[in-house]
Amino acid sequence: MAAILVKMRISRTIAGLALLAGAVTTQASMIPLSHLEAATVAIFQDYTTKFEQQVSLAFTNSGKLWIDDDHTSRHKDFDAGKPIVQARENADIHNGSIHHYSGTIRVPGATIEHVRHVMEDYPSYTSYFKPDVARGTGVLQPDSKPNDDHYKSRLFLTESTIWVDVAYDAQYDSHFMRLDANRWVSRSTTLSIRELLDAKKLDGGLFPEGEDHGFLWRTNNYWFARERDGGLDLQVDSMTLSRTTPIGFGWWGNKRTHDAVDKMLRDTKAAIESVR
């Protein structure tokens, strides 16, 4: 999963920033359209590939989460079940911006089977992650293996703010993999994200992919789960590609994305607790 709360709140952040930077309207149609270039996508893909090689593979080999190396008071908050969020990358690139935040939370009494159930229960996303998901479906693929559930999913994401209404028809390729008795990971990447012409009409028209307002172009999301001492340690890394952040508003975009990851962790914990 993990392609939900962060994506929507990043998109609305970019929308709000664009409006604050030079518009006095609450309609997305008044914001200039953006064109997604192949070179921009290549930079994003290179970034996510390096993450997989340096972080995702490391968890597979060692089972360590980044919170394990944090010896501040935040570790006590983590053990108490509070979400801990940290920025990794918030930078403009060629014709776009990359936002990457890591978050972690502990869920006492939970198991890998609990988080697996939540993540693969796409029709219930509308309850687990409201109001960000208006509709969700997922299809288990025939090449799935006993320890590797392969899904292709379709989520309708929607968000209303004081600045702009935005909605997307988003499709993902996801693998949910059991590494061993105590560890589980997921990898979710974008197959297609298309902005709706009218955020209020989920079955209405769509902008051509990459020829829209640029609020959300790509996203890669990774979950790492570890059973330990009668509970579940969770980490999420979310990387999103969007249009360039307006000059002077980067600090606000960072705050919004930080808060989005925080909410996603809380919602995921609540969802797991609801199915235990």
Image: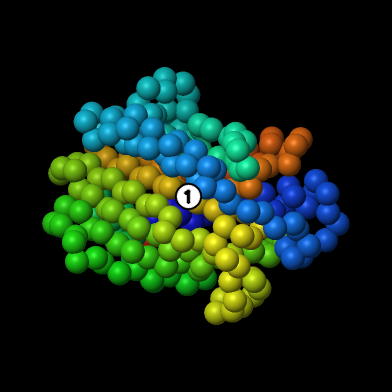
Above or below for 21 versus 214: above
Residue behind mark 1: 219
| Residue 154 sits above or below residue 213 on the image | below
* Residue type, label 1: Thr
- Left or right of 233 in this view: 98: right
Q: From the image, which quarter does the C terminus lie in?
A: bottom left
Which residue is located at x 78 percent, y 62 percent? 30
In the picture as drawn, the residue positioned furthest to the top comes out as 71
What residue is shown at x 63% (from left), y 53% (from top)?
A: 35
Location of residue 252 in the rendering, given as x and y in whole percent from the top left corner: 70, 40
Q: Position of residue 4 (x, y in %)?
A: 49, 56
Of the pair 223 and 43, the residue shown nearer to us: 43
Residue ID at (57%, 48%): 37
Image-quadrant location for residue 45: top left
- Where residue 125 appears, as percent x and y from the top left, is 43, 65
Q: Is residue 159 visible?
A: no
Residue 107 is left or right of residue 252, and the answer is left
| Farthest-out residue, front | 38
Secondary structure beneath dot 1 equals strand
> What colour scheme has been applied to the protein in the rendered image?
rainbow
Is 66 left or right of 246, judged from the image as shown? left
Local crowd size for mark 1, using a 10 Å CA cut-off: few (<14), some (14–19), many (≥20): many
With respect to residue 155, does 10 lie above or below? above
